[in-house]
Amino acid sequence: MHKYLCALILIFSTHALSEPLYWSAERGKLKYLIVGSVHVGDDSMYPLPEKISRTLAKSNGLILEADIRKTEGLQYPAATLASHNILNKQQQKDLAGIANLLELNPSEMLNAPPWAAALTIQMRQIQYLGYQADNGVDVHLMNKAILRNVPVLGLEPLQFQIDLLTGQKEGGKELLTSTIEQFDHNENAIHCLIDSWKAGDLQKLNQFAKLTEMSPEFEQAFLTDRNLNWVEKLADPSWLPNKKGQYVMVVGTLHLIGEGNVVSLLKEKGFRVKQLSTSEQAKCEFKY
């Protein structure tokens, strides 16, 4: 089991007796409503809990990982490694087989940068299960914020995220090889994650967070460092439009669970944090 798909496939929906996980964090006159983002989804996820919608409507801003609308001037570095350069013969064969299964061009996948091939496979697999990026929670709330003239703010520039992805060791070899190795197990992981989010099952999600083959370097760059940077920014409201007030914050779910998560770090900064959602146990098990 690994975490690489989490940012893409942690899907959740409302449920009669439970809710997706969300928290309040308050310090002085500064208030955050914190929601775990899932970057793909379907119509069954909505509507979100009324508390989230009401808070967004009267908030001073919606805080995202990055404002995905700000694409002007974005740059991708020239690729120096293709997937076939970093894969052994068996891995190349497996990648080609996965590409054929997902109706992708095997030659294009083998010649794409490793990080790009991995993300393409992940997104296509998710689409085959019926989920779309346009139905992701962050996009959903961003569209609502725009309609209500609520300012949209980013914790980091979109270029930072691109540089993070494209700057991985050996062009993203770890991400690609993990995607290939775990391909056959992902369906179970996706379905159990969906069930866990529908139930708001924090224990099950924390269990998933521990079932990882992510290298320390990858986890440091994609989770640990970003969590620390975000919390430093959130604790210093000088960058916010009103320097105080109520904000809705939507970030990737993995940043809110497990060791060193944003919620725990905010507590260390003196914020009073409370889970607002009601949870129940998900009726599924992760196979690993």
Image (cartoon, rainbow, N blue to C red):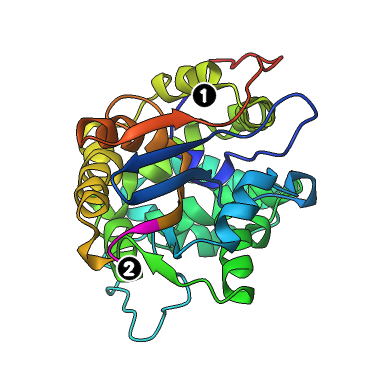
Real-space Cα separation, disc 2 to disc 1, in angstroms: 34 Å
What residue lies at 43% left-to-right and 56% top-to-bottom?
247
Q: Which amino acid type is shown beneath numbered disc 2?
A: Asn
Q: What is the crowding at mark 2: few (fewer than 14 residues within 10 Å), some, or many (at least 20)?
A: few
Relative depth, front residue between 257 and 265: 265
- Please give the count of numbered marks on the rendered protein: 2
Residue 31 image label: none
Say which residue label 1 marks.
205
Relative depth, front residue between 111 and 89: 111
Say which residue label 2 marks.
242
The answer to whether residue 34 is magenta is no
* Quadrant in the picture for residue 240: bottom left
Which label lies toward us, 2 or 1? Answer: 2
Horizontal and vertical percent for residue 172?
Answer: 32, 50
Horizontal and vertical percent for residue 2?
Answer: 44, 29
Helix or strand or loop: what does disc 1 sit on? helix
Relative depth, front residue between 100 and 56: 56
Q: Which amino acid type is shown beneath numbered disc 1?
A: Leu
What residue lies at 29% left-to-right and 55% top-to-bottom?
171
For the residues bearing labels 2 and 1, Cβ distance under 8 angstroms: no
Horizontal and vertical percent for residue 138?
Answer: 55, 57
Q: What is the crowding at mark 1: few (fewer than 14 residues within 10 Å), some, or many (at least 20)?
A: many
Horizontal and vertical percent for residue 131?
Answer: 71, 50
Q: Residue extending furthest front?
A: 29
Sequence-wise first label, 2 or 1: 1
Vertically, is 118 above or below 267?
below
Q: Is residue 247 left or right of residue 104?
A: left
Vertically, is 141 above or below 96?
below
- Residue range corresponding to the magenta coloring: 241-245
* Quadrant in the picture for residue 268: top left
